[in-house]
Amino acid sequence: MGKDKTPSAASTSVETAPNSEQQAAVAAAIASFRGLGSLRLTFCDRSPNPYADETKSLIDIYVDDKGHEYWFDPTADRLVQVGPHAGRHQKALQVKSADRLPVARLRELALELAGKAVENFQTRRENLHPLEDNRKGQIYFFRWDDFSQPVKESEMPPFLQVALYADGRLASFTDTLRH
């Protein structure tokens, strides 16, 4: 694991791969979250969870054929992170003006994904600090920080972040909230 807390692509598996039934269940859960009918995933590795305080917490890392990487916590049975596959260099996506959604619609989509990821998100949302930003009008970030517990000076508070391309497609997702 590097300084950025990203499991390295060359990390060794701590345990054996999940069986085919478990992998199929993960694929179905992720496909449901993404709003896809089905999703073909390839298991890559099992690695320590960089967002967990406990060193025994593990994540299963999968990739799809579109270049997305998924971190799934098999113990908590939840998706932790989605983003571009670390080993794949993708060209930056440029969304055409005609395809851009209004920020209000992007916010609605982000809230829908947050609700899918965190069972009681609508209730918890009242106690989370919202942040919104965008990168050159191409990717919009919707983030909710949990400041309910003190954190060490060098640590970030638990958060949920949904990044969407301007046309509404998922760019990345990270959930470090403690459920």
Image: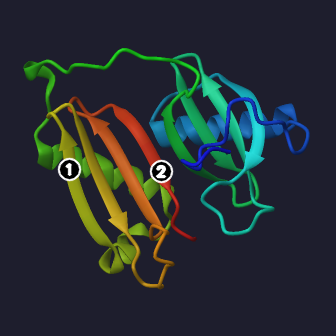
Look at mark 2 in the image and give the residue it sits on.
174
Q: Identify the residue at image location x=57%, y=71%.
A: 178
**Residue 143, located in which quarter of the rendered image?**
bottom left
Image coords of residue 24 (percent x, y): 74, 33
**Pointer 2: residues within 10 angstroms few (<14), some, or many (20+)?**
many
Image coords of residue 107 (percent x, y): 22, 51
**Residue 11, located in which quarter of the rendered image?**
top right
Q: Amino acid at mark 1?
A: Asp
Image coords of residue 96 (percent x, y): 14, 18
Q: Identify the residue at image location x=64%, y=22%.
A: 40
Q: Is residue 109 above or below residue 8?
A: below
Q: Colour mode?
A: rainbow
Q: Is residue 7 left or right of residue 58?
A: left
Q: Nearer the viewer, residue 104 or 148?
A: 148
Q: Is residue 174 above or below residue 102?
A: below
Look at mark 1 in the image and give the residue it sits on.
133
Q: Is residue 24 left or right of residue 70?
A: right
Q: Identify the residue at image location x=43%, y=64%.
A: 159
